[in-house]
Image (cartoon, grey):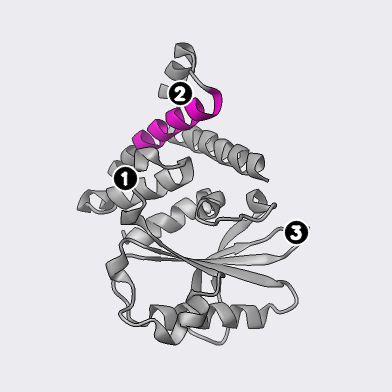
């Protein structure tokens, strides 16, 4: 299983995770939908597109790219796909923002001068997972991303069961920490109940906490 595939699975389950990486998330962030979009009449497939809800005040579309291997053509491809998508949807969207997630800074293309205007425009953010610090100190969403990065660095992640167990344990730890930050000390009875939650239930709780955090910032 490719590591970027794991990320896209997380994005599909938790579209709000992308907005952990955006300084000013849109007010309708919790209603965005994550899609894998194929642009007709080309060989392009855009893996990470976050579509705003129909009632959004500003219809900003977000593009995500996850990169765990060196690709000198990455920026050529990313911006070509991005602008072709916008060309095909000129009526629907009025702004865009791109987030490019690298496993490490060394995976960036060697030369970015031809795209410097776009990369430095304020509409693109580059994120380097190995520079975000200790996952235990991160917000819930970023912690999940870092957890995925760590577990995907081993071949054992190829085993769906091992991957699920690793994500479940890491997610439970992050949920405990986030609950404590939001509400202070948690009763032992509640902690015991959380210990028994399934991965699906932990995902639902994590999503609710992410929504609560974004609402408190809006």
Residue to which mark 1 is pinned: 163
Helix, strand or loop at disc 2? helix
> Can residue 44 be seen from the camera position used here?
no
Labels 2 and 1 touching (C-beta < 8 A) = no
Left of 1 or right of it: where is 140? right
Q: Magenta includes 173?
A: yes
In the rendering, at what x and y percent does residue 200 appear?
48, 36
User: Does 145 appear above or below 111?
Assistant: above
User: Label 3: few (<14), some or many (≥20) within 10 Å?
Assistant: some
Extent of the magenta region = 168-183
Residue drawn at (55%, 24%), measured in percent from left and top? 183
User: Does 98 appear above or below 211?
Assistant: below
Discs 3/1, front? 3
Discs 2/1, front? 2
Q: Residue furthest left?
A: 155
Residue to which mark 2 is pinned: 194
Residue drawn at (40%, 50%), measured in percent from left and top? 145
- Rounded to the nearest angstrom, the CA distance separating label 2 from label 3 is 35 Å
Residue 200: mark: none
Q: Splitting the image into 4 quarters, where does residue 90 fall?
A: bottom right
Left of 97 or right of it: where is 44? left
């Amino acid at each position: 299983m490719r590591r970027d595939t794991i990320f896209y699975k997380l994005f599909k389950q938790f579209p709000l995770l992308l907005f952990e990486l955006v300084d000013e998330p849109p007010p309708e962030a919790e209603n965005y939908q994550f899609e894998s979009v194929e642009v007709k009449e080309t060989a392009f497939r855009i893996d990470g597109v976050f579509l705003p809800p129909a009632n959004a005040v500003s219809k900003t579309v977000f593009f995500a790219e996850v990169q765990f291997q060196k690709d000198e053509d990455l920026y050529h491809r990313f911006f070509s796909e991005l602008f072709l998508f916008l060309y095909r949807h000129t009526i629907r969207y009025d702004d865009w923002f791109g987030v490019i997630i690298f496993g490490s800074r060394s995976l960036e293309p060697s030369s970015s001068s031809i795209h410097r205007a776009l990369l430095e425009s304020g509409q693109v953010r580059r994120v380097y997972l190995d520079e975000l610090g200790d996952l235990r100190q991160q917000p819930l969403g970023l912690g999940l991303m870092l957890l995925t990065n760590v577990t995907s660095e081993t071949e054992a992640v190829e085993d769906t069961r091992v991957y699920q167990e690793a994500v479940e344990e890491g997610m439970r730890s992050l949920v405990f920490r986030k609950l404590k930050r939001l509400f202070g000390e948690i009763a032992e009875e509640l902690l015991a109940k959380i210990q028994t939650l399934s991965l699906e239930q932990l995902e639902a709780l994590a999503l609710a906490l992410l929504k609560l955090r974004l609402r408190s910032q809006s």
